[in-house]
Amino acid sequence: MIDQIYRKAVLTVSGQKFVENIVRKQGWGLAQRFVAGEEVEGAIAAVKELDAEGIQGNLDLLGEFVASPEKANEFAEKVLHLLDAAHAAGVMPYASVKLSAVGQGQTVDGQDLGLTNGRRIVGKAREYGGFICLDMEDHPRVDQTLSQFRTLAEEFGTQHVGTVLQSYLYRTEADRDSLDDLSPNLRIVKGAYLEPESVAMPDKADVDASYRKLVYAHMKAGNYVNIGTHDESIIEDVKHFALAHGIEKDAYEFQMLYGVRRDLQKELAAAGYRVRAYIPYGRDWYPYFSRRIAERPANVMFILKGMLKG
Ligand SMILES: Cc1cc2nc3c(=O)[nH]c(=O)nc-3n(C[C@H](O)[C@H](O)[C@H](O)COP(=O)(O)OP(=O)(O)OC[C@H]3O[C@@H](n4cnc5c(N)ncnc54)[C@H](O)[C@@H]3O)c2cc1C
């Protein structure tokens, strides 16, 4: 409950324009702990650095909901450029995309623009043997994201597109079951948005229990699972579950955020587990940065100390 109150407070405060203006002005140096640069070159360099430690990359051009088709198309072009740049640099074009950033919810020529741009992006990833994970956003977008994921998976194959399920939502167990026929590659996370209690579990213990249940169900169904968490006790339990059920190490991977628990990322990779770091980059880093701060009280101290130092 305390976690929930803290998270709500940080996300509410960070939503205030004057706070955003201060942090945007002074915070870039601090944001670099979680963000691999403002341009694609920085992100590709980060992938290569991690690769040397046996950790793979998941590139994420930062950006969230855009209100106009022009902006959505502009963003989609940048994602296509990211895939080209990764391919040209000899890096696997594995990226995450928020459909709201490429036009989800806007109708152009009778089609949802998010889906149109999703097709262009996943199509390009397939051309390069890459993979696109459709990030999951706040709850009003879940239905449309799952339905667009299904369309893209049927058109391009689940080896080239996956999506994310959030364990804090009451609906997620049923969502996972309903996707089973696709044998999808899913990332399971706890959920990062400020959601009402009518849709999301308020207690951390329930979110954690739901998390384990989802991962185990997805593993037992024989699907590839991306375990997107830094929670060591869950990671340990998943390792034991896999061992006990004869699930090989190449049937799942651990995913963590760039700059968070680097020690654990290295330790798992050294022990022969697949590990992938989610590497965000770009100029629109503020909302992403705020969510990372909201996840852990110690991160606020890190910010305040950094700002006081000037
Ligand atoms: C690869 C990846 C992709 C994600 N994609 C999505 C998505 O598409 N949609 C979505 O809603 N959410 C997404 N998330 C965020 C996720 O929902 C959680 O908000 C976030 O992962 C924190 O929860 P946790 O599972 O690490 O567990 P928690 O219980 O929050 O944390 C467990 C421990 O991890 C460490 N930790 C966690 N966060 C931080 C941090 N920011 N800084 C320092 N230490 C930290 C702390 O030691 C903490 O005690 C993603 C997370 C990951 C790792």
Image (cartoon, rainbow, N blue to C red):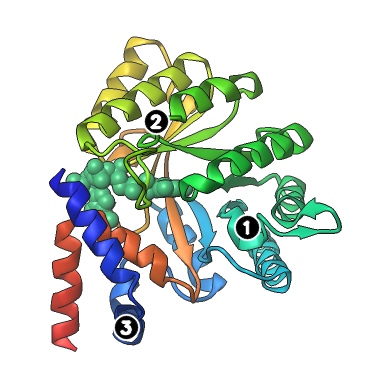
Tell me how far mark 2 sits from mark 3, CA to CA.
Answer: 34 Å
| Direction from residue 83 to residue 296 in the image, left or right | left
Q: Which residue is mark 2?
A: 170
Compared to residue 226, the image places residue 193 above or below, namely below
Of callouts 2 and 3, which one flags the residue occurring earlier in the amino acid sequence? 3
Report helix, strand or loop for mark 1: loop
- Name which residue lies at 18% across and 52% down: 5
Q: Tell me which amino acid carries mark 1.
A: Gly
Q: Which residue is mark 1?
A: 90
**Farthest residue in the front direction?**
198
Question: Do the residues under discs 3 and 1 have CB atoms within 8 angstroms?
Answer: no
Tell me how far mark 2 sits from mark 1, CA to CA.
Answer: 41 Å
Compared to residue 260, the image places residue 237 above or below, namely above
Residue 215, percent from left and from top: 40, 25
Residue neighbourhood size for the residue with mark 3, other residues' Cα within 10 Å, grouped as few (<14), some (14–19), many (≥20)? few
Of callouts 3 and 1, which one flags the residue occurring earlier in the amino acid sequence? 3
Q: Nearer the viewer, mark 2 or mark 1?
A: 2
Residue 146, percent from left and from top: 60, 37
Of callouts 2 and 1, which one flags the residue occurring earlier in the amino acid sequence? 1
Q: Is residue 263 visible?
A: no
Q: Is residue 271 visible?
A: yes
Residue neighbourhood size for the residue with mark 2, other residues' Cα within 10 Å, grouped as few (<14), some (14–19), many (≥20)? some
Q: Nearer the viewer, mark 3 or mark 1?
A: 3
State which quarter of the image contains the N terminus.
top left
- Name which residue lies at 18% across and 55% down: 6
Q: Tell me which amino acid carries mark 3.
A: Phe
Q: Tell me which amino acid carries mark 2.
A: Tyr
Question: Do the residues under discs 2 and 1 have CB atoms within 8 angstroms?
Answer: no
Q: Which mark is residue 18?
A: 3
Report helix, strand or loop for mark 3: helix
